Amino acid sequence: PDVATAVDAAAARPSEEPKPAAGEGQLGLRTIESNHEVKARQSSPLRLVLTQARSDLWSAHPMFFTSLFDPLRDFVLDPALAISCALLPPLFSNAPRLDQLTASCLKVALFVPIKSIYSHVPHRGSAGTSDRSLRSASRDAILHTGPAQGRMPKFQPPSDLRSAFQGGISFAVSAVGDIVGVLTNPRKMKKWVDALGQLKAYLDASGVGDELEEAMMKPMLRGRLLDNLKILNDIQERQDADRHIEAKLSGGDGTHIEQEIREGHRLMRFATAAYGTEMIKSAIDVEVEHEDLKDHKQAIAVHTGIAPEDVRYIYAKDDSDLHILHHFAAVDKKSKSIVLALRGTLSLSGAIVDVQGMSRNFCLGLAHQGMAEMAEAVWGASGEEINNLFKEDALKDHGLIITGHSLGAGTSCLLNIKCHVEKLVGNRPVKCYAFAPPPTFYPCSDDATGDGKPDPPALVNLAIKNTVAYIHDNDAVPFLSIASVRKLAALLDAVDNKTEHMWFYNRWKIFHEYKDIPQDIYDAVAEAAKNEASEVDGECRMIIPAHVVVWMKKNVISGDFEGYGCDASAVAKNTVFIGQDMFSDHLPEQYEDALDALLEEYSSTN
């Protein structure tokens, strides 16, 4: 018999309704009818409308802008409809008329117009046609086996635009899930409220809140904030263009940090992989099979270049009362180390940790409060698992490498110090590679050498010597601390004191560069930069605790990158650089691209 014809016939055969068993008579029929009635009662009009909207969404196949539509559907529209379908109908369970009214309003005012507009947009065939095409391709793959027959196309590396879009969507989806988790967990909500209340109390008591309000809220309400930011950006580009040169170590040019570049290029992929599969998809730069990216463990292995069985431990719990960064541990045979990779900020809970920048005592020094608590929480959750790995015969001589990006990088730096000071893994070597870390630590000790820098205790000093940090171009996060934010507020306030007396038309001409910035604004900013405000409670001049900070600068004309080995204390003296790329330069894929370019340059010269 023709197999293909049989398959089509089976697929086209209408399903038969279940019949009552012999002897049941009308009782079986009534049972079937009652089941249908139960299903009808369970399906509210609002649920039916939302379910139909999800079905229509997945039936849409526009011909244009698919690279934007697909992630928008996958990560925003469909999750929003799914959450609405789960949460809204139960709210109206005791108000059927309100349920019907809401369903009618959504259908008439939103879904029907969208479908009408879509019908006039060029699009591919219907879902049925797509299903038949897919079935035909599958049938051909079975009947005509061959190496290239019926093979699903490989996953293609995304464009820069789509990569950035997917990264933003991942954060948005995670934030929605974070809010839902807080709303359903009173104890977690209490921790949020306590943390935010503590931050507000600190801002009010220290006066930092008043400084931020004067520098940002007042000009924003009067329509001058964007003008002030643009003017400050132009001044910084002129006055601080060589800030990476001024922070460079003696002999810290690119030729002396080649090993740091090579190690960073490899370990940055571990830091990206800690974010999860979607972030890996946004950063991946090679063609891979779709199957390799479906499972988190497999995706980590593909992106980092290790075997799947070497991914030994993954922590991805969100149901606990205490927010703990997702992380994983993997065996890196190349460095004979266990790599502990910590996720960066990908949720509102993570953002709350970021803004808790007040200082607290930590390992013979002062540290960023939120990240110090996170370092302790991560080791409390997984420290035993890590030490159990070291007990295996094949791993007894392995060291520990801690890495992460953003919040994960700052936490990695502090966990690295904690491992050295408290001997958390014994005497085995511990190293840290931190990508885009904020300033997190200040070693409390006297200046015994007279060089103007603190002399940390031996174990803290060893931890710093075993740490390398990385900054990509104009990324703002590595300069964010209470001290730098106060300095930025002072600079903006200096600009605002001048622009508040300007006519709107003059500010408009300066904004669009039809008119030069007046010299008195340059002078005011320079004067504000020289003035050092007295420290407030909870503030100290924290640094990135690394023996070298690799600053990867991009040439705006050629597009080439150049690496500079910089001193952490000199880097900390810089304020936040205002620019349109101050946040886009922070994305993990941007760090990977910069390290790719630098490694390619080293390889070509050698």
Image (spheres, helix red, strand yellow):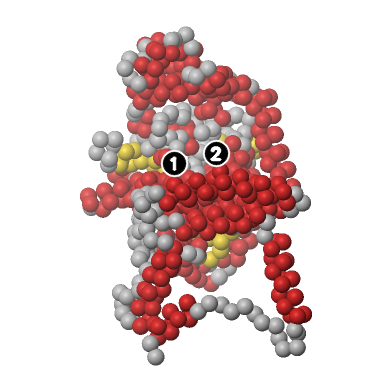
- Residue 47, image x and y in percent? 64, 55
Query: Which residue is rendered at x = 36% and y = 56% of the image?
Result: 157
Q: Amino acid at mark 1?
A: His
Can you tell which quarter of the image residue 318 is in? bottom right
Could you classify mark 2 by the number of other residues whose Cα lies within 10 Å: few (under 14), some (14-19), or many (20 or more)? many
- Name the image quarter holding the N terminus: bottom left
> Label 1 belongs to which residue?
586
Residue at far left of view: 605
* Residue 558 visible in this rendered orientation of the protein: yes
Q: Is residue 534 left or right of residue 468?
A: right
Considering depth in this image, is 576 or 70 the residue closer to the camera? 70
As drawn, the label of residue 440 is: 2
| Disc 1 element | helix
Q: Earlier in the sequence, mark 2 or mark 1?
A: 2
| Disc 2 element | loop
Q: Amino acid at mark 2?
A: Thr
Query: Which residue is rendered at x = 66% and y = 33% of the image?
Result: 199
Q: Is residue 381 left or right of residue 281?
A: right
Q: Is residue 514 left or right of residue 185?
A: left
Query: Which residue is rendered at x = 40% and y = 32% of the image?
Result: 580
Can you tell which quarter of the image residue 43 is in? bottom right
Front: mark 2 or 1: 1
